[in-house]
Amino acid sequence: MRLDDFDPNINVEDQRGQGGGSGFGGFGGGGGGGLLFGLLPLVFSRFGCGGVAVLLAVLLFFGGGLGMLGGGGGGQVGAPTQQAGSARAGTDAKSSCTLNAESKVACNAFSSADKTWAAIFQREGKTFQQPKLVFYGGDGRSGCGAAQSAMGPFYCPRDQGVYLDTSFFGELANRFGAKGDFAQDYVIAHEFGHHIQNLLGTSDKVSSIQRSGNEVEGNKASVKLELQADCYAGVWAAQNRDRLDPGDLEEGMTAAKAIGDDTLQQQSQGRVVPDSFTHGTSAQRMKWLRTGMESGDPNACDTFSGAI
Ligand SMILES: [Zn+2]
């Protein structure tokens, strides 16, 4: 896909190289700060001002705790400051996005998705909020807890962050056999799709189903959420159709096929357990990515009512 260079004003946070590879041993402190920070808008939207007041009280309490922890390790106190500082974007985004080829691919795709979805929201009279792209290596921290490379890329609704360890792109090509720039773009666009679901309130509905305690129903809802994120990734690609190279659709399909639950389970445990699916089968993932790419319309991505 021939994407423009990223807009230097995209919101990028970089956790790579912090702590000198020794990890964030005590990052419960830093992560806690980030968690509370990220919870503010969430609590506000769900519980209104009363909720925020309660949260602030908790924050003050935790703030004191953080101060005490601060003496123990330099990295932790910096964490919340770092997050607040990411609003500076600009030069930060530039150096983080050009650290290596993978970072640049991620930033270009993120930046393009940002523009595309801002325009879609504007057309539909909805308010768009820019998410942030967070680079981490090995161990990182997010508003949703520890970020570990083994988890693969993920989106954290609490801090509206798309988390990526760029080594995943190598894994995608080598372990999953999904090569090519579009496979990587699809990963970013899928995570961006989760941000769209967060803005539209879809993720909230799914988490309430998951909290209800029925694991099978929770997994089913998760599959619908994931397939919709695949479809949204396709919508983004369709909206940038003039930039697609021959073979991009196939690259996307190969990636979608490789990361289907049935395929992954078959590879790892030699059998398939549909009730434990959380992302959908290879066929379903391919179908919904294709639906997005062919329609270019987010309204075509209704995985919740009807057959998937
Ligand atoms: Zn996902």
Image (tube, rainbow, N blue to C red):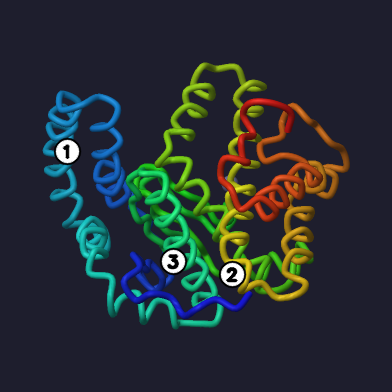
Q: Residue at x 62, y 60 (%)?
A: 238
Lateral position of residue 97 relative to residue 286, left or right: left
- The secondary structure type at the circle numbered 1 is helix
Mark 3 Cα within 10 Å, few/some/many (few <14, many 20+)? many
* Amino acid type at image mark 3: Phe
Lateral position of residue 290 relative to residue 230, left or right: right
Q: Could you say where residue 160 lies in the image, as x and y percent from the top left?
A: 38, 49
- Mark 3 or mark 1: name the one nearer the start of the chain: 1
Q: Residue at x 15, y 23 (%)?
A: 50
Which of the 4 quarters of the picture holds residue 277? top right
Question: Can you tell which of label 3 and label 1 is closer to the viewer?
Answer: 3
How many marks on residues? 3
Residue position for label 1: 59
Residue position for label 3: 135
Residue position for label 2: 167
Distance from mark 2 CB to nearest ligand 1 atom below 8 Å: no
Q: Could you say where residue 166 lies in the image, as x and y percent from the top left?
A: 55, 69
Lateral position of residue 104 relative to residue 60, left or right: right
Q: Which of 50/306 is in front?
A: 306
- The Cα–Cα distance between marks 2 and 1, rounded to whole angstroms, is 34 Å
Q: Could you say where residue 175 lies in the image, as x and y percent from the top left?
A: 76, 64
Quadrant, the C terminus:
top right
- The Cα–Cα distance between marks 2 and 3, rounded to whole angstroms, is 10 Å
Q: Residue at x 75, y 70 (%)?
A: 174
- Mark 2 or mark 3: name the one nearer the start of the chain: 3
